[in-house]
Every structure is written in C-alpha cells, then in structure tokens.
Amino acid sequence: MTPACHNRPELTAYLHPSGELIPHRMSQPCKSWSTGDRATPVPVLEGWQCAGCRWLPRADVLRFAQITTDPQLMRELTELAGVVECWCERCDKEKAGTSGVGLFLRFRMNLCPICGDKRCPRAADHRNECATELAKSSETVAGEVDRMTGVKADVIRTFGDSRLRVYISGPMTGYPNLNRPAFAMAAEKVEAAGMIPVNPHDLCEPNWDWHQCMRADVSALCGCDAILMIDGWHCSNGAQLELHIAHRIGLRVLLNWHDVIDFAGRK
C-alpha cells in the first residue's frame, strides 16, 4: 500500500501566538526506515510502496538491504534505493567507490539475478550462463543435442553399459590445442579405473561456438554419475558452471585421483 506520508509536503515551522517561530516537532527526513538495529523496518513489515517518495532515506534502505537474509528482498531494496542494476561480483567491483555506496557494494552478497543463488557462475559475472536455468532445461537440451549431433548423442548415453560414467571438466580456452592432452590423460585414467570417461572434446563440432558446446556438454553431464575436475578448473567459466550443475543434480564431485579410485570401488 502507499502510505499517507508518501511525498508529503515539507514540514515547516509555525508561528506561535507569542510571535516565536516554533520548529515542527516531526523530523524532516523519513524515520520509518531508521530502526537503529537489526529490526525489520515498518515499511517492510507492512508492505509500504515507497518508490518515488521524495523523502525516501536511501542510506537506511541500503543498511537493511545489507543485513537481510532474504535475497529477493535484498534485490528489491537496492532497486528501491536506485543503486545498482546488476548483482554480479564483476559489476560490483567496477561500481565500488561510486555514488557513495562503495562500502555496501564490496560487502553485500552477490546473487544470480535469475535463480538468486550466490554460488551460480552468473553471480560472479552476469555474462555467464545461469546454471539452474541450464539444469532445468536439461531435457530440452538433450533433445537439441540429438538433433545437432546425431550419432554422438547415442555414444554419450551408452545405453546397456552398467559401468559408472565420469564427466571430465577443466579449462580449454587459452590453452594450446584446447588442453586436449590433459583431457585425454584424465580419460585414460578413468577408463583404467573401470569407468566410462565422458570427454567434452568428443562431444562438440569444431565450428560450434561456446554456447553450443556448453549445451552439448551439459546434456552429457546430466547423464553421468560423477564429475572429475582437472587442473585449472578454477579459472574456467565453463568448468565452474559444470561443477555448479553437478552439485545441483547430486553428482559425485571428484577432485583428485584418490577420489576417482574411491568412487570406482563403490560399485
């Protein structure tokens, strides 16, 4: 609801019969947002519509946005204060120190604008794909991979083979030959452990762009039992995205060869 005080006139002093000019007893700035502690402000509790009010105390709105644990409310409050459009860490670093809100931007929680998850790769950089969106559309993606790759889709699934499947994830961009030797070595070790390696280099065509490759890779990942992270995955947007999806769909995460041997022995 819109409160009665929305865009109220300025509170002016009044003239006492004695001739003395008496200041107005109410404070000029809005104090409805000033709780002074971690208590929830009245406008939030009662659902006030304060957008566009000339007396909106933006500093108090941002203060509560910084301490709330509700991601959706945090987004709404910062938009209400007119501070930021993007919630990723990359944009925060660029905007920190501007508009007098640098401290808030450096210490607030970075969230994906689509799923609201702070661990989503899009929370680090809005140019990344939202992992939850990709995971939700895995069936559609699988159908698209069938259409785009034909035989490769059948190879990915390897129906009838009861062995565990391990997806290999790591950096490609910027490496000589797209880091194929490291992926091939990892695939050999996974196969030696008695499991089926799923090498993303075997899934994509040379003329595909990054997004087409990620769609095919995510489809293959969703059909695996575990994901193996090879050296350098921390610096790869694609590998971080695949790791996030693996977490969300309950795959086992393997970070070293001891994990591979341990996982192979569970069957």
Image (tube, rainbow, N blue to C red):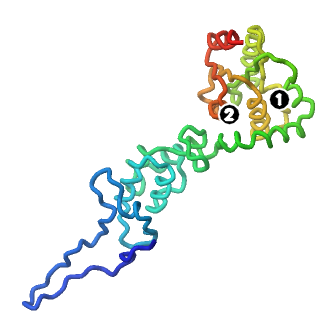
Task: Report the residue at 83% width, 25% height from top.
Answer: 202
Task: Report the residue at 78% width, 30% height from top.
Answer: 220
Where residue 63 appears, as percent x and y from the top left, is 36, 53
Q: Which residue is mark 2?
A: 238
User: Marks 1 and 2, Cα distance to the nearest angstrom?
Assistant: 14 Å
Tell me where residue 225 sits by quadrant.
top right
Sequence-first tag of 1 and 2:
1
Q: Please tell me whether mark 2 sits on a helix, a strand or a loop.
A: helix
Tell me where residue 197 sits by quadrant.
top right
Give the position of the C terminus as an image quadrant: top right
**Amino acid beneath label 1:** Leu
The furthest residue to the left: 18
Residue 145 disc label: none
Where residue 242 appears, as percent x and y from the top left, is 67, 32
Asked if residue 113 lies left or right of residue 227, the reply is left
Q: Is residue 82 above or below residue 209?
A: below
Q: Which residue is mark 1?
A: 203
**Amino acid beneath label 2:** Gly
Q: Please tell me whether mark 1 sits on a helix, a strand or a loop.
A: loop
Q: Is residue 107 above or below residue 155?
A: below
Say few, some or many: other residues with alpha carbon within 10 Å of mark 1 (under 14 / 14 to 19 / 20 or more): many
The furthest residue to the right: 151
